[in-house]
Image (cartoon, rainbow, N blue to C red):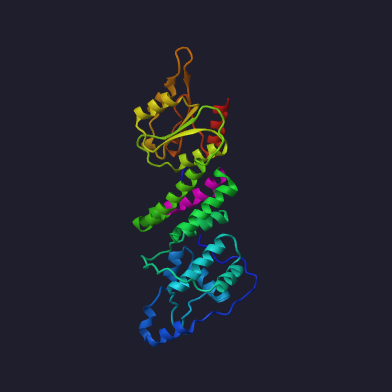
């Protein structure tokens, strides 16, 4: 829960498709003479936009005929908006597990889109592919869609992952590896990549919050109070915990990011939680004394006052043991199991 490869073509069934030329596009290119070579995007720029390798794009052209409609022999490939739209359709299908040959047949049969998107301007050099390592196909598809800034596809992948895998597996095997890959890319490329991180984080948060607030018959047990430390702005892991609690039909109260100490202690007294989970992403935001204050905080009538079990979670606590009276689970599954045992005891 420590919050946050360029793939080649997939299996080939041997099918090969003849390249589909559009005569009108070719005639226009010839009429423009040599100046037409500047029209469209080169393969490298298209690869960076789509989050795949140039080798993959060339392989799709060679094997299946997914290539520029107006390419002339002896000239560099230039991809028009319609050509790029076909490649985007290929990316979506292969990310969903469709074999490339089957995806190519479907894309070519569908024909060019009625309103192809305008090509994005090429950015600085370097691959925009996210190197996610050995991961589930859903994660690889999510990373590619995020690089393309393909919001509808990102949302679909996340929704399907939560529905098919459940919150814990969707978070640990699909969302988290993609988020970490974005973080690494952002750290190395700076502001050039911040748009991908923002888009992916927003959609991950939306998917988790949607799962957390869906109508559910909750068990009649004390709620879990979820909060980030006073200087902590990262809350995606808390969103994952909230969604996991809903899956287990356990109630929660979400306070979110940067909760001031007084507000946190007041919320503990007012809600009477069975457990309190405090998130810290970095050592700079961890406050052991505040955790100890939460541990000591009691509520209820005189003679029957109660205390909550406190979980100090996140990488911010890893340099030292949890404060006395608090637990420190290291994984989402471990935290959910502990919370369920605590509030249902």
Residue appearing at x 39%, y 54% in the figure: 186
Q: Is residue 130 visible?
A: no
Between 322 and 23, the residue placed more toward the observer is 23
Q: Position of residue 300 (x, y in %)?
A: 45, 18
**Against 320, is 154 above or below?**
below
**Against 68, is 5 above or below?**
above
* Majority SS type along the magenta span: helix
Q: Position of residue 336 (x, y in %)?
A: 54, 35
Name the quadrant of the C terminus.
Answer: top right
**Against 204, is 11 above or below?**
below
Farthest-out residue, top: 303
Q: How many marks?
A: 0
Residues drawn in magenta: 168-184
Between 316 and 271, the residue placed more toward the observer is 271
Instruction: Based on the picture, tell me whether residue 182 belongs to the magenta stretch.
Output: yes
Residue appearing at x 53%, y 54% in the figure: 157
Q: Position of residue 73 (x, y in %)?
A: 47, 85
145 horizontally vs 192: left or right: right
Q: Is residue 262 visible?
A: yes
Instruction: Based on the picture, tell me whether residue 193 belongs to the magenta stretch.
Output: no
Residue appearing at x 50%, y 49% in the figure: 175
Q: Position of residue 125 (x, y in %)?
A: 38, 66
Quarter residue 36 falls in: bottom left
**Against 27, is 146 above or below?**
above
């Amino acid at each position: 829960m420590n919050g946050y490869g360029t793939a080649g073509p997939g299996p080939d069934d041997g099918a090969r498709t003849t390249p589909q030329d559009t005569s009108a596009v070719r005639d226009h290119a010839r009429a423009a003479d040599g100046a037409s070579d500047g029209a469209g995007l080169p393969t490298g720029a298209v690869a960076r936009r789509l989050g795949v390798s140039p080798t993959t794009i060339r392989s799709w052209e060679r094997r299946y005929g997914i290539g520029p409609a107006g390419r002339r022999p002896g000239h560099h490939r230039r991809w028009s908006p319609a050509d790029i739209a076909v490649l985007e359709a290929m990316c979506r299908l292969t990310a969903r597990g469709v074999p490339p040959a089957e995806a190519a047949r479907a894309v070519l049969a569908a024909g060019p889109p009625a309103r192809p998107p305008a090509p994005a301007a090429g950015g600085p050099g370097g691959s925009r592919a996210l190197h996610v390592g050995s991961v589930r196909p859903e994660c690889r598809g999510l990373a590619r869609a995020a690089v393309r800034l393909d919001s509808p596809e990102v949302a679909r992948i996340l929704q399907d992952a939560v529905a098919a895998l459940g919150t814990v597996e969707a978070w640990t095997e699909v969302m988290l590896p993609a988020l970490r890959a974005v973080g690494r890319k952002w750290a190395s490329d700076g502001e050039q990549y911040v748009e991908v991180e923002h888009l992916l984080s927003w959609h991950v948060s939306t998917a988790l919050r949607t799962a957390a607030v869906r109508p559910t018959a909750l068990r009649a047990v004390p709620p879990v109070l979820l909060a980030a430390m006073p200087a902590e702005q990262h809350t995606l892991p808390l969103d994952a915990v909230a969604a996991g609690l809903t899956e287990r039909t356990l109630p929660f109260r979400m306070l979110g990011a940067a909760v001031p100490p007084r507000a946190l202690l007041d919320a503990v007294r007012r809600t009477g939680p069975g457990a309190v989970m405090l998130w810290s992403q970095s050592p700079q935001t961890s406050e052991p004394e505040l955790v100890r204050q939460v541990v000591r905080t009691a509520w209820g009538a005189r003679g029957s006052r109660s205390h909550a079990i406190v979980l100090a979670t996140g990488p911010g606590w890893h340099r030292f043991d949890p404060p006395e009276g608090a637990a420190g689970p290291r994984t989402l599954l471990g935290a959910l199991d502990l919370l369920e045992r605590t509030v249902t005891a």
